Image (cartoon, grey):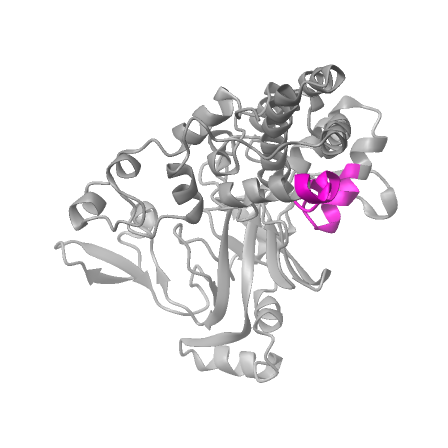
């Protein structure tokens, strides 16, 4: 049996060649000093990393049967249907090995191709540094799962089914594939390829109930069981203060919220009436804006903790929703008809329109919990497939991100292992 290629092994080693990985034994807890100095993560080491720490130069795949290798080759040759470049996955190398009936060469070529292709299908091909502003962790495939999937595909002769199981399940992914297949002009094909890739950056399944914000479309939608039950216009971050792409979980809505003014915005409010100053432990001050009709958050904000303090909220500046270009906020998502959005998001008959109106009138800051914790995805799609196969609906690339992503797609994948792709 042959070894996995040196290139794949080096990627595996490089992915985890950090001081903590070199100094800590499997299962060993890092010291406080190692955590404090950045040598080790505070959280438990992932299963995938534990697997890779045990890798050595004699790592070998299971023997590839002729049928499984041929099925893999056929999948590679049609991977352009997913917006990928088949040449990136070594079809000539695998085809030559099969023609020569060289088992060692088949094992190496097929293993390398499966690793690279499975990572691309599950996680995308564009490296993180080219996904500008994208901060979502895609949980669909880790290294240990990837090797297990490959072995299962070989044992059960189910290569096609195994690789298909990694594709996004969202209806838009399949419809964009249709656009790609039928498009005659290169611009439409490029739009489809870039946005197929972005769907691969998201979790394969978004859940039975979720909110998705599409920044270029200036929309926020609540989806239940595959159906949009509420779609609202949105104002997103300006070009100078772009909205980051992230995921969070909405657990409630605050009515009559206070606005905790971010440091970056303090110069805009300093000295103005209507703000409360609060002393900080460092001896400085921070600013808060009380609830009311002029509060920057309007009458509600969604509770959705994340590392970037981005959330959906109301606004007193309603006129902006009537503009076509709505990239005008400091990063948060201003939501049109926000109280209606809050009512549907809460999903609680107790919080009907009358109670929400009464709460707003009372002026007291109150948090209402959602009936179901609801994932929120703030994404960046510059195109959608039109209904009934009627082509594509393009959106303005408001932050100018398509070019770099497309260049990276056309330049080829830089990773072969799932854990190195994130």
| 162 falls in the magenta region | yes
Q: Residue furthest left?
A: 283
Q: Tell me: residue 286, above or below residue 133.
A: below
Indicate the position of residue 131 as horizontal and vertical percent values: 52, 34
Look at the image and give the residue range highlighted in magenta: 154-177
Would you say residue 137 is visible in this rendering? yes
- Who's the residue at 43% across and 48% down the image? 47
Q: Tell me: residue 169, above or below residue 289.
A: above
> Which image quarter is the N terminus in?
top right
- Who's the residue at 49% across and 70% down the image? 253
Q: Nearer the viewer, residue 133 or 285?
A: 133
Left or right: where 247 falls relative to 258: right
Q: Nearer the viewer, residue 267 or 185?
A: 185
Would you identify the image quadrant in which residue 150 lies? top right
Indicate the position of residue 181 as horizontal and vertical percent values: 82, 32
| 361 falls in the magenta region | no
Q: Tell me: residue 176, above or below residue 80.
A: below
Q: Nearer the viewer, residue 343 or 45?
A: 45
């Amino acid at each position: 049996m042959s070894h996995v290629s040196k290139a794949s092994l080096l990627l595996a080693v490089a992915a985890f060649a950090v001081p903590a990985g070199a100094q800590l034994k499997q299962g060993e807890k890092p010291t406080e000093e190692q955590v404090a100095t950045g040598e080790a993560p505070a959280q438990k080491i992932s299963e995938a990393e534990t697997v890779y720490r045990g890798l050595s130069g004699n790592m070998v795949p299971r023997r590839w049967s002729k049928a499984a290798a041929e099925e893999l080759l056929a999948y590679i040759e049609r991977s352009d249907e997913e917006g990928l470049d088949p040449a990136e996955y070594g079809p000539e190398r695998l085809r030559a090995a099969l023609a020569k009936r060289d088992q060692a060469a088949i094992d190496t070529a097929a293993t390398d191709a499966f690793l690279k292709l499975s990572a691309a299908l599950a996680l995308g091909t564009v490296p993180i540094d080219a996904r500008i502003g994208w901060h979502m962790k895609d949980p669909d495939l880790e290294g240990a799962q990837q090797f297990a999937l490959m072995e299962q595909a070989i044992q059960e002769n189910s290569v096609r089914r195994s690789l298909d199981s990694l594709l996004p399940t969202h209806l838009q992914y399949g419809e964009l594939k249709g656009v790609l297949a039928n498009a005659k002009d290169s611009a439409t094909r490029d739009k489809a390829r870039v946005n197929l890739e972005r769907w691969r950056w998201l979790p394969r399944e978004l859940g039975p109930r979720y909110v998705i914000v599409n920044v270029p479309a200036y929309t926020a939608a609540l989806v239940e069981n595959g159906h949009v039950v509420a779609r609202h216009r949105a104002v997103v971050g300006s070009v100078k203060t772009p909205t980051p792409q992230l995921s969070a979980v909405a657990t409630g809505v605050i009515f009559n919220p206070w606005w905790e003014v971010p440091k970056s915005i303090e110069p805009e409010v300093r000295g103005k009436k209507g703000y409360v100053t609060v002393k900080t432990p460092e001896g400085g001050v921070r600013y808060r804006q009380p609830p009311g009709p002029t509060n920057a958050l309007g009458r509600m904000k969604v509770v959705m903790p994340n590392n970037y303090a981005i959330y959906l909220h109301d606004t007193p500046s309603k006129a902006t929703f009537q503009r076509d270009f709505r990239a005008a906020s400091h990063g948060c998502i201003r939501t049109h008809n926000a109280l209606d959005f809050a009512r549907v998001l809460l999903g609680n008959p107790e919080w009907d329109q009358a109670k929400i109106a009464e709460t707003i009138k009372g002026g007291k800051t109150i948090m209402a919990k959602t009936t179901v914790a609801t994932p929120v995805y703030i994404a960046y799609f510059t195109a959608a497939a039109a209904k009934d196969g009627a082509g594509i609906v393009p959106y303005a690339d408001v932050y100018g991100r398509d070019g770099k992503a497309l260049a990276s797609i056309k330049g080829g994948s830089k990773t072969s292992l799932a854990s190195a792709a994130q």
